[in-house]
């Protein structure tokens, strides 16, 4: 570990804390329907969209119609994206003449992008036409992120409202999240990235004769526009196979910082929006603190592990001062690769600037744990906040059990219905992650995909189902996952991880909104102090720790012990 | 319900037009106008011919040139399209090795590279980036130490004094942005172009 490495990490953390407030306050205005400085420009587009879609923006929805709207919109998105991939060969803007995608891969990719996972079974530059990348994938990058934000806002309204029937209008939340939040920020970020070297064109791939006289085909395309929203919407689906490790998708340390800021920006800011909307800013900062503590712990472990050389290289006479450089780029080095890995898996982004498969075993375990905890550490846009609030419900429930009082959170009584729904969302993750992993490691089509031998091969499979269920999308990328078996099972895992979360959470939102507010009394457990922060972090770690420890012990932990003992595979 | 389905379809189309067409096309137009060089891939021309991109590494094998890092990219086998063969720095198929730390395949590859590099410069410890595959397979950079490691070989192949080649590395080397962000590095293609310019 170097001093300079820690300085970069510190600058990143401080800048996120500073950016959270203005962006969060802006989003609060947007979702409370107030005027913002962008209203004069965006307002006409917004009103026209409502007119075209037949949406009455003044009419709010009960939680059930809200949920139905979410599901209908997701189904339409899925069908459109599936059809676009299957018909790619006959659609326009296809200079590289890419053929149709196979049915299983098209299913997987459509689910993947609609569920905001952006797991990529395919390699972008050799499979997808520019048309599919823009009209299909980029669109989902926006709207799947907007759906996540809408749901988080609906849940926050559940806490903020008293004796109310409705939790907002999905079409309005969707449109506002896209037009007022994601689109303007993406334009700014995309142009900044181009200025720093990211390509943005619709040219055919460039054929060059290299300095030594060899032929090189340089894949390009509208990279910056997709990259900006891929980071900002915590999507993570790269334009290129190597994702943000590709020099066109991340040319230098400055673009790397912009990309890392974009991943956390909305997730961190939503904690402020939450505080503003429930009328107590300290509630928002308490959530921010829990996220920050868990994040820093992850960074310290990954950076610590990666800064050391691979012990099995001892005896080769290597100057290993730079740490574990397999699967990393020189311009980022170990510090920025470690930081990016924690950022991208704490949030449900899944973009990578280094290959997690080649990390030290313990460093590779942290991304796994981040995802298994449900991506609540800033998390996916929207998804992080609603996931964290579910844990908060469980935390106050446990605190209530300990002192024998009915638990309350933000002035709302937490009763059987909320706790049941919260537990349901928490149990979906291990069910899909552990269930599908167990299946894959006992049947032939599952075993066939492993690239690495020994327990690291198993880690690849565990990582794949963890990433899919948590809607992250990063990978231990050695796994050959573009097969009918993996495309299907991972697709199902992504569906479970997205929609079996969303429905109970909207039910909680509806049930909370309908409740009366309970005035805080001397017996109310304060949810703004250090005690609550510690309790919430503890609930998250214990829930995750108990559930996944055996699965992790077989994978990264055995791998680590093998490495120390000099055992190779 | 029927009205909701209609809303879902129409809102999808409306948002798709804005985010899938207007946004990327608009960004492309501005980018091409304001930053044409970057927007078209930071291509480098020599004698009027495009010879590569400043951002994309190239495979160098001649002892007269500095070499980049090991690359795990592959390409379809021209003999048999169902198979792939190693094709370092294939800029149409980026990929890393994805080998874990305990894999025999990794250790054998490293042992091979170490043997070759030791033969070339036996007295200096080998910088770790010269024997580890990059994440993209297209890393355009090597560390300054990795460039200096290759100076004796390049100088000998070109009949140049080592000090001149070492000075050139120093000139081409990029530092951290604002002294803080990123790592010091040397762009291999730029270095080799400068080398060709110097030898004339």
Image (cartoon, grey):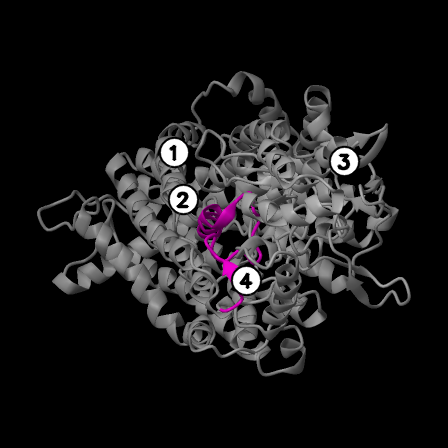
For the residues tagged 3 and 2, is the chain the same?
Answer: no
- Residue matched to label 3: B196
CA gap between label 4 and label 1 equals: 29 Å
What's the magenta region?
A315-344
- Residue matched to label 4: A358
Chain letter of the residue beneath label 3 in the structure image:
B
- Mark 3 or 2: in front is 3
Outermost residue on the right side: it is B79
- Residue matched to label 1: A15
- Mark 1 or 2: in front is 2
Label located before the other in sequence (2 or 4): 2
Circle 4/circle 1 CB separation < 8 Å: no
Of residues B35 and B52, the one nearer the viewer is: B52
- Residue matched to label 2: A5
Q: Is residue A330 magenta?
A: yes
For the residues tagged 2 and 4, is the chain the same?
Answer: yes
For the residues tagged 4 and 1, is the chain the same?
Answer: yes
Could you tell me which secondary element the residue under label 1 belongs to? helix
CA gap between label 3 and label 2 equals: 35 Å
Which residue is at 60% across, 34% downward?
A: B167
CA gap between label 3 and label 1 equals: 43 Å
Label located before the other in sequence (4 or 1): 1
């Amino acid at each position: 570990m170097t001093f300079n490495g820690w300085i970069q990490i510190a600058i990143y953390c401080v800048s996120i804390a500073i950016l959270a407030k203005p962006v969060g306050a802006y989003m609060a205005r947007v979702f409370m329907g107030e005027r913002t400085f962008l209203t004069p420009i965006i307002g006409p587009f917004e009103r026209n969209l409502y007119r075209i879609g037949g949406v009455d923006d003044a009419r709010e929805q009960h939680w059930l119609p809200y949920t139905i709207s979410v599901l209908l919109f997701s189904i339409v998105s899925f069908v459109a994206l599936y059809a676009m991939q299957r018909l790619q060969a006959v659609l326009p803007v296809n200079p590289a003449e890419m053929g149709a995608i196979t049915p299983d891969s098209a299913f997987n990719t459509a689910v993947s992008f609609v569920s905001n996972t952006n797991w990529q079974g395919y390699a972008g530059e050799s499979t997808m036409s520019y048309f599919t990348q823009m009209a299909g994938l980029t669109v989902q990058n926006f709207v799947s992120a907007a759906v996540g934000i809408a749901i988080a806002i609906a849940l926050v309204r559940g806490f903020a409202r008293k004796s109310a029937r409705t939790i907002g209008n999905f079409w309005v939340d969707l449109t506002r999240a896209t037009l007022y939040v994601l689109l303007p920020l993406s334009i700014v970020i995309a142009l900044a990235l181009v200025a720093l070297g990211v390509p943005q064109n619709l040219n055919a791939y460039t054929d060059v004769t290299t300095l030594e006289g060899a032929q090189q085909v340089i894949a390009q395309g509208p990279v910056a526009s997709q990259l900006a929203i891929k980071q900002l919407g915590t999507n993570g689906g790269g334009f290129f196979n190597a994702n943000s490790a590709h020099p066109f998708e991340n040319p230098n340390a400055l673009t790397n910082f912009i990309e890392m800021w974009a991943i956390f920006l909305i997730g961190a800011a939503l904690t402020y929006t939450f505080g503003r909307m429930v009328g107590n800013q300290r509630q928002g900062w308490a959530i921010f603190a829990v996220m920050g503590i868990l994040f820093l712990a992850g960074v310290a472990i990954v950076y610590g592990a990666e800064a050391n050389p691979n012990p099995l290289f001892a005896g080769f006479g290597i100057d290993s001062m730079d740490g574990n450089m397999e699967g990393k780029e020189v311009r980022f080095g170990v510090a920025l690769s470690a930081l990016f890995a924690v950022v991208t898996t704490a949030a449900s982004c899944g973009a990578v600037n280094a290959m997690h498969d080649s990390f030290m075993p313990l460093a590779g375990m942290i991304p796994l744990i981040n995802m298994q905890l449900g991506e609540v550490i800033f998390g996916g846009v929207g998804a992080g906040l609603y996931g964290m609030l579910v844990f908060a419900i469980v935390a106050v429930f446990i605190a209530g059990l300990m002192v024998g009082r009915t638990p309350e959170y933000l002035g709302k009584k937490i009763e059987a219905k909320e706790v049941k729904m919260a537990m349901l969302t928490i149990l979906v993750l291990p069910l899909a992650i552990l269930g599908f992993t167990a299946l894959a490691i006992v049947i032939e089509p599952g075993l066939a995909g492993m690239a690495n031998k020994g327990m690291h091969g198993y880690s690849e499979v565990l990582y794949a189902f963890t990433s899919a269920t948590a809607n992250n999308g990063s990978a231990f990328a050695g796994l050959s996952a573009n097969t009918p078996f993996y495309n299907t099972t991972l697709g199902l895992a992504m569906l479970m991880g997205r929609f079996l979360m969303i429905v109970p959470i909207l039910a909680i939102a509806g049930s909370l909104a309908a409740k009366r507010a309970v005035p805080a009394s001397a017996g109310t457990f304060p949810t703004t102090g250090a005690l609550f922060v510690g309790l919430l972090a503890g609930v998250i770690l214990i829930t995750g720790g108990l559930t996944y420890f055996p699965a992790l012990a077989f994978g990264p932990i055995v791998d680590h012990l093998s490495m120390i003992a000099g055992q190779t595979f | 319900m029927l009205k909701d389905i209609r809303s879902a379809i129409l809102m999808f189309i409306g948002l798709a037009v804005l985010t899938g067409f207007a946004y990327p096309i608009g960004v492309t137009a501005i980018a091409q106008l304001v930053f044409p060089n970057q927007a078209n891939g930071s291509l480098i021309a020599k004698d009027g011919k495009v010879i590569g991109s400043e951002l994309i590494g190239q495979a160098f094998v001649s002892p007269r040139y500095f070499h980049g890092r090991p690359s795990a990219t592959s390409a379809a086998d021209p003999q048999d399209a169902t198979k792939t063969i190693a094709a370092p720095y294939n800029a149409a198929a980026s990929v890393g090795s994805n080998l874990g730390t305990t894999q025999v395949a990794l250790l054998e590859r490293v042992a091979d590279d170490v043997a070759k590099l030791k033969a070339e410069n036996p007295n200096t410890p080998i910088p770790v980036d010269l024997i580890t595959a990059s994440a993209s397979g297209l890393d355009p950079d090597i560390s300054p130490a990795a460039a200096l490691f290759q100076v004796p070989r390049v100088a000998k192949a070109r009949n140049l004094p080592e000090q001149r080649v070492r000075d050139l590395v120093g000139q081409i080397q990029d530092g951290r942005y604002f002294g803080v962000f990123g790592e010091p590095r040397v762009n291999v293609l730029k270095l080799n172009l400068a080398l060709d310019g110097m030898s004339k």
